[in-house]
């Protein structure tokens, strides 16, 4: 499955909190990811309509690296397919 990659530009907590069975606090966040291409493993060229686009992804974050701005992020196959579907739909 193809997977899009990008750079995290913003992390916004939604206020929703979950404590797991180990006592760790997870916060639901909206990540703004600026697309840069497909992951090296899956290859392929990013469509022109998606180059530089910023997409929003909802994720659960717990550790400090989950909140880092400026780092690479790889979308899941489901997130990738949703983005590709959204941008390939006729306007």
Image (tube, rainbow, N blue to C red):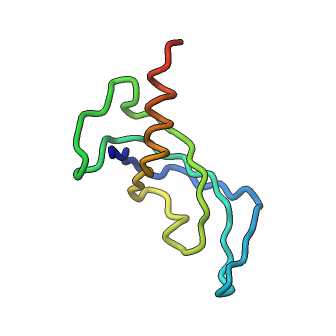
Q: Could you tell whether 87 is left or right of 11 in the image?
A: left
The residue furthest bottom is 22
Q: Residue at x 37, y 48 (%)?
A: 5
In the rendered image, the residue lying farthest to the top is 91
Q: Residue visible at 40% across and 41% down?
A: 35
Residue 70's image quarter? bottom left
Give residue 62's quadrant in the image: bottom right
- Residue 29, how many percent across, how many down? 64, 57
The foreground one among 60 and 7 is 60
Residue 40 vs residue 65: left or right?
left
Task: Give the camera-side residue of 69 and 76.
Answer: 76
Locate residue 34, reporting x and y percent: 44, 42
Tell me residue 18's x, y (percent).
73, 71
> Is 45 on the left-hand or right-hand side of 62?
left
Q: Vertically, is 28 above or below 46?
A: below
- Total label count? 0
Going 30% across and 43% down the picture, which residue do you hit? 38
* Residue at (48, 46) in percent of width and height: 78
In the displayed structure, 81 sits above or below 68; it is: above
Query: Residue 40: where, in percent of width, then height?
Result: 23, 50
In the figure, 45 relative to 40: above or below? above
In the picture as drawn, the residue positioned furthest to the front comes out as 1
Q: Could you tell whether 14 is left or right of 51 in the image?
A: right
């Amino acid at each position: 499955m193809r997977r899009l990659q990008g750079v995290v530009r913003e992390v916004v907590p939604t206020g929703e909190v979950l404590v797991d069975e180990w006592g760790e606090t997870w916060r639901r966040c909206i990540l703004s990811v600026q697309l840069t291409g497909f992951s090296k493993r899956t290859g392929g060229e990013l469509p022109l309509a998606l180059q530089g686009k910023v997409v929003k992804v909802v994720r659960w974050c717990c550790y400090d690296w989950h909140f880092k701005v400026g780092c690479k992020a790889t979308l899941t196959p489901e997130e990738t397919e949703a983005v590709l579907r959204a941008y390939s739909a006729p306007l």
